[in-house]
Image: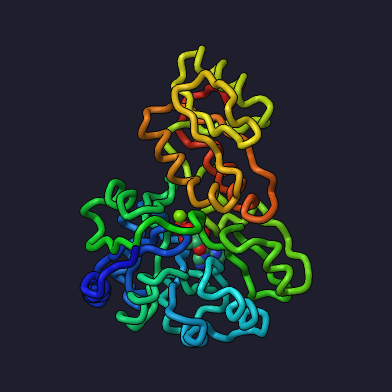
Amino acid sequence: MTASTKDIEKAAGVLRAGGLVALPTETVYGLGANAEDPAAVARIFQVKGRPPSHPLIVHIGGAEYLGDWVEDVPPTARLLAERFWPGPLTLVLRRGRRVPLEATGGLETVAVRVPDHPAALALLSAFGGGVTAPSANRFGSVSPTTAGHVRAELGEAVDFVLDGGPCEVGVESTIVDVTGEVPSILRPGGVTREDLEAVLGFPLAVPSSSLVRVPGQHPSHYAPRARVVLVEPGKIVTEAALAQELGHRVGVFLPPSLTGTQVKAHAVVAVPSSTAAYARGLFGFLRELDRQGCDLIVASLPVEEGLGLAIANRLRRAAGPRPSTAPGLQER
Ligand code: AMP
Ligand code: MG
């Protein structure tokens, strides 16, 4: 599904007028504003409830415009942009003068990417500038992968929701910092580490949890209302049954290896065996278990290779400690 020309024009008009547009990308839906309009950018933070020190990604219409937004483009950045754009790869580079500090959380670096979605590219082309956009959800909650998710969560706070159908990739972009001598992954995502390494010809460091500048690195992020508990795959069925007996309304992420197993739970999601399908469905599964009234989700981590690295990262964050939840299963 792709958006109509009329909708694209309307969305571009909203951006020009300093408004907010929720836009489809291949990763998740973004909450977009004119990257060069500090007041519009400030509204993104307000609507999301996101601390202003947390930088946003500037979306541009093609790799050929990269030089307009950053101070310089090192050869590694050029190589990665040529190979992976449009696509779920974000490059962190030195901030160009066009980018206001409001968009970078005060940093002298800026994150840039070219989204691989026909409606996003059509919007960027009609608008003619950069669109800065984090995921179109409230800070800390589950990212939206359909226009319906955005409407349900942000409603009237967004001036226009451009519906481009469900997101193909389903997890956020991979963020690679190319400002230093050696590029490093700040957040795993839709482009795999293996694919990056194959192009670069050397290994990349696995993201460290100490990178507080990246919101995805906070202890709790991508979190549904239900508490998420991670256990070994072999313990999913017993943990779920125990929690259910203790009075929880348990949602289960049933791994493909356990397909067909009877589970005592309130709701069960069958985890797809392909990691691409799992990534595509992940945030929707979390939302669905919330919708069904689960208060506890029992899941296990996939093997951390390929897209499994990004899925495991999101699940760990979803299960991360929350500021104000009552003690329970997780602390046993
Ligand atoms: P979101 O997934 O909604 O949080 O989208 C923005 C992501 O890009 C966040 O994880 C940001 O921290 C990250 N990001 C944006 N700009 C920078 C930057 N200059 N350095 C590091 N990470 C950045
Ligand atoms: Mg986000």
From the top left corner, tell me how far across and down residue 49 is, in percent: 36, 52
Whether residue 54 is visible here, answered yes or no, is no
Residue at 60%, 35% in the rendered image: 255
Where residue 6 sits: x, y (%)? 21, 73
Q: Position of residue 209 (x, y in %)?
A: 64, 51
The answer to whether 251 is drawn above or below residue 63 in the figure is above
Which of the pair 90/327 is nearer the observer? 90
Q: Evaluate whether residue 290 shows in this view.
A: yes
Q: Is residue 200 left or right of residue 89?
A: right
Q: Nearer the viewer, residue 128 or 205?
A: 128
The image shows residue 1 at horizontal and vertical percentages of 34, 63
Residue placed at 42% from the left, 34% from the top? 289
In the picture, the quarter occupied by the C terminus is top right
Q: Nearer the viewer, residue 232 or 176?
A: 232
Q: Is residue 83 above or below residue 134?
A: below
Q: Is residue 20 left or right of residue 87?
A: left
Find the residue positioned furthest to the front. Answer: 260
Q: Count every numbered label the image shows and give the total.
A: 0
Task: Name the image quarter holding residue 33.
Answer: bottom left
Q: Residue at x 46, y 19 (%)?
A: 248
For residue 16, side relative to residue 210 (left or right) = left
- Residue that appears at 57% across and 15% down: 242
